[in-house]
Image (tube, rainbow, N blue to C red):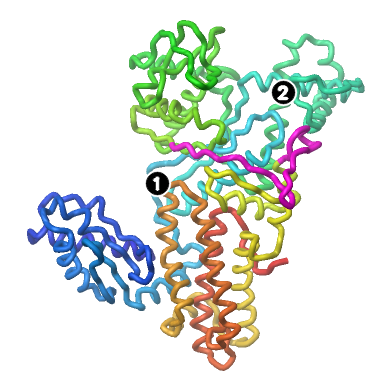
Amino acid sequence: MNIFEIFSARLATALNGMIGDGRLPAGISLARVVVEPTKDPAHGDLAINAAMVLAKEAGQAPRALAEQIVAEIARDPDVLKAEIAGPGFINIRLQPSVFTKVLKAAVLSGPAYGRGAARPQPRINVEYVSANPTGPMHVGHGRGAVFGDALSGLLAFAGHDVTREYYINDAGAQVDVLARSAFLRYREALGETIGEIPEGLYPGDYLVSVGQSLAAAHGPALRDKPEADWLPLVRAAAIEGMMAMIRDDLAALGVVHEVFFSERSLQGRDGNSNAVHQTIEDLRARDLIYEGRLPPPKGQKDEDWEDREQTLFRATKFGDDVDRPLLKSDGSYTYFANDIAYHRSKFTRGFTDMIDVWGADHGGYVKRMQAAVKAVTGGQGTLDVKLCQLVRLLRNGEQVRMSKRSGDFVTLREVIDEVGRDAVRFMMIFRKNDATLDFDLAKVVEQSKDNPVFYVQYAHARCASIFRQAGEAFPDMDLSPAALAKADLGILTDESEIGIVKMIAAYPRLIDAAAASHEPHRVAFFVHELASAFHSLWNKGKDAPQLRFVNQTDRMSTMARLAFVHAVRSVLASGLAIVGVTAPDEMR
């Protein structure tokens, strides 16, 4: 039950009636009219901007138009009071019965409360993590993984058709370096003393198992072959081993992708057609490719720049700062050419809405990629790039750096194993993605109100404990949602209770807004705010017996408050599920 959506529809009906009787001109656009929460709850429950945005086109003073709109709104039986503020803003206070209906809807819906209706179109592709398959993931990858997964969960809950995708960067020079590093471990597994890992190869212990697997499968047969013979085989085995490790680490974080897309498959390798060539020829046929020379980049390094005649994509035609090269001097494709073909593939697979989650160091790549998507989709596709800032890993305020597993950084798996999936996921999403995150290994496991994940989970556990207490006090009480929804919810008149009910009423709108803006952190912020309000009400009940959730002498009051607690519990569970965090019934 989305009261903002409901009253938006009622307002539209009223405004269309005013168009019909000539008080508003025919053809006037209602697109900018919104119904939203008031900035200050003291001013009411809903704020309407209709008079302010329609006045000019209507040829009326905003306040005069507001008076007419208020007269229409005041007829609604669910409106307690409608008044004009300032030059023409309209504030609405709703009847208490509206919030009783909201609470009943939340009780009956359970954790599905706030879920959007199915929206099969447009299909949305969310690509995230996409770490190079050259070693274990670090905590920065973890932030992108959590953000992308939480965003996917949010979009799915809002009703969208979402596909979670991982792009395997298995075609660049880095996978050849990986193969040579694995070959060294293969020789080690055969009994050779390899000494210190040479500079330029990957030093971590994670390749030891790949070398052992190669030795078990091939014995010494590969050792004396020329590199050209063993490199493809070792590369494939190393990539397979690294992707198995990455999948396992992601699973430990609760992240599962539906699609793993290989970069190599775009280049005509392994029996596939050359999608990069096809993409370039398609752009060339539309006069979006030309041969030219680019000036050197100003003030920044661009690895694709070369001082020569080049094959260039007309990126400036689609909003980029300069045109972009697609072929290197040796005739191989630039990374950008591969990425264009990859995003064209997304579009041909039916995704018009694309969301990429990247590290902050790729910020300079955004405009060119958005230009490319406009070009290859003929303007039908959109690309939103969400950049995740750095994570500083701390322990009691001191920075943590080293790891034996990776050779030079603390791995994501080490962090998950130490503090648990829930702490990692919630804290990674409890800060906006474009802000640097300090992740303190000691603080995220504290059992205190200063630890956000504990504070929210504890609120859910408290809700569960209230039901256990009620079951002991009233063994014969029917505590099903259907029975709770029949309780006299008019009993809930304390301002703290009403404030929480109004928060619950705002939850469906929050889901829609967060999904539309691709901001899953807003869900984490909301459940933390709701948990805080609930804990405050719990503490208030210590001094005010009439506010206690279970009253052995008042069955009716207990039923009403249990319905209230069930609604709070449902919304907490819903929000935690969206961001991929468990909602425990007990804290251990």
Q: Residue at x 38, y 69 (%)?
A: 41
The type of residue carrying mark 1 is: Pro
Q: Residues within 10 Å of mark 2 (few under 14, many from 20)?
A: many
Q: Nearer the viewer, residue 326 or 217?
A: 326
Q: How far apart are the two marked residues, 2 and 1, measured between alpha carbons?
A: 41 Å
User: Horizontal and vertical percent for residue 105?
Assistant: 42, 70
- Vertical position of residue 217 compared to residue 243: above or below: above
> Which residue is farthest top?
309
Q: Residue 11 in magenta?
A: no
Q: Nearer the viewer, residue 281 or 220?
A: 281
Tag 2 near tag 1, CB within 8 Å: no
User: Horizontal and vertical percent for residue 154?
Assistant: 49, 51
> Which residue is farthest bottom?
553
| Front of the two marks 2 and 1 | 2
- Vertical position of residue 121 compared to residue 304: above or below: below
Q: Residue at x 20, y 59 (%)?
A: 51
- Vertical position of residue 170 compared to residue 114: above or below: above
Q: Nearer the viewer, residue 145 or 475?
A: 145
Q: Which residue is mark 1?
A: 120
Q: Which residues are magenta?
A: 384-411
Say which quadrant the C terminus sits in.
bottom right
Left or right: 393 with respect to 190? left
- Precedes in sequence: disc 2 or disc 1: 1
Picture quadrant where residue 183 is located: top right
Q: Residue at x 92, y 22 (%)?
A: 191
- Vertical position of residue 483 compared to residue 523: above or below: below
